[in-house]
Amino acid sequence: MSRPLRLAISGASGRMGRALLSLLGDDTRFELVHAMVAPGSAHTGQPVFVGRADSLRYAHDWMHAPAPDVVIDFSGPAALATALDYCLMHGTALVSGTTGIDAALETRLADASKRIAILRAANFSLGVVLLKRLLREAAAALPGWDLEIVEAHHGRKQDAPSGTALALGHAAAAARHTTLEAAAVYSREGQTGKRVDGSIGFAVVRGGDIVGEHMAMLIGQGERLELGHRATDRSIFARGALQAAHWLVGRAPGQWQLDDVIATPH
Ligand code: NAD
């Protein structure tokens, strides 16, 4: 049997980090070797529980990370940038679900993917991968129908619209031979005038403990097609990220997607 993959988690004390830790207790494919948290976090130096008490302790830097095969990052843009530096320096594969990334970091990630394997997804659920495929097909087949994307998340979410909503918008725009930059309408207030033909509208709901909901509405005359996905448990994202990490180790440098993981099982 091959040895377990050595895994580091960036954002280990967060909601997603904890979901990963709770799955790792039963997952013999991985050995957790590093658990990164924010500088100043109360977790620093505390023991990490992976199903059981472990000798590993939370760290707030990469200095003593013991050569992981892969890093899974669910943190924030600043922490992702630091994880990326580490991965580039050591040739380590990187899986990231962090959203809210600016253009400069996008460019750095694209450059880095010439040297290391990077897999990013705004949503690590299998259902959302399928939602995106279905939306692409529907947007192309019904080019004259108005498209609106509505998303809902818990009230602590930092960015809007969600990375998943934007990814859905990009997919639909490409299927209609345009770009989201050209088609998106992110807010409506006051005297908006009539809806612009071909635009893609976004609406955002925030509150309570909503894990993540996305609905794409294709609105025609007298009928409406609704393609929706509801996540009820964030462990689906953690499960998808672990599957992606297992798949990514040993792949060529590049920007990989969850679609690739599903299309090409290990
Ligand atoms: P969270 O706020 O609960 O946790 C953030 C984690 O990052 C914490 O462990 C924190 O210590 C760490 N961190 C923050 N700043 C840091 C820094 N500068 N250096 C090192 N570590 C730092 O957040 P969350 O709900 O776990 O979400 C994290 C990210 O993942 C967000 O961008 C969120 O939108 C995204 N997310 C993606 C998916 C997906 O499927 N792609 C699913 C859920 C959340």
Image (spheres, grey):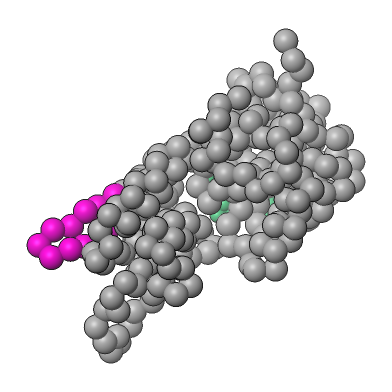
Is residue 189 found inside the magenta-colored segment of the image?
Answer: no
Q: Residue at x 28, y 75 (%)?
A: 197
Q: Residue at x 48, y 65 (%)?
A: 160
Instruction: State the predominant SS element of the stretch in magenta.
Output: strand
Instruction: Classify residue 67 as left or right of residue 240.
Output: right
- Quarter of the figure with residue 249: top right
* Rendered-image quadrant of the N terminus: top right
**Magenta-highlighted residues:** 217-227
* Relative to 260, 173 lies left or right: left
* Residue 7 rendering spot, x and y as whole percentages: 74, 33
Q: Residue 193, percent across and down?
A: 26, 87
Front-lying residue, 183 or 20: 183
Q: Position of residue 253 (x, y in %)?
A: 73, 43
Report the quarter where the C terminus lies. Answer: top right
**Between 85 and 144, the one nearer to me in the picture:** 144
Residue 179 visible? The answer is yes
Does the magenta run of residues contain 225?
yes
Residue 11 appears left or right of 40: left
Q: Residue at x 44, y 60 (%)?
A: 174
Spot occupied by residue 237 in the image (x, y as percentages of width and height): 52, 40
Q: Looking at the image, is 4 positioned above or below residue 226?
A: above
* Residue placed furthest toward the right: 63
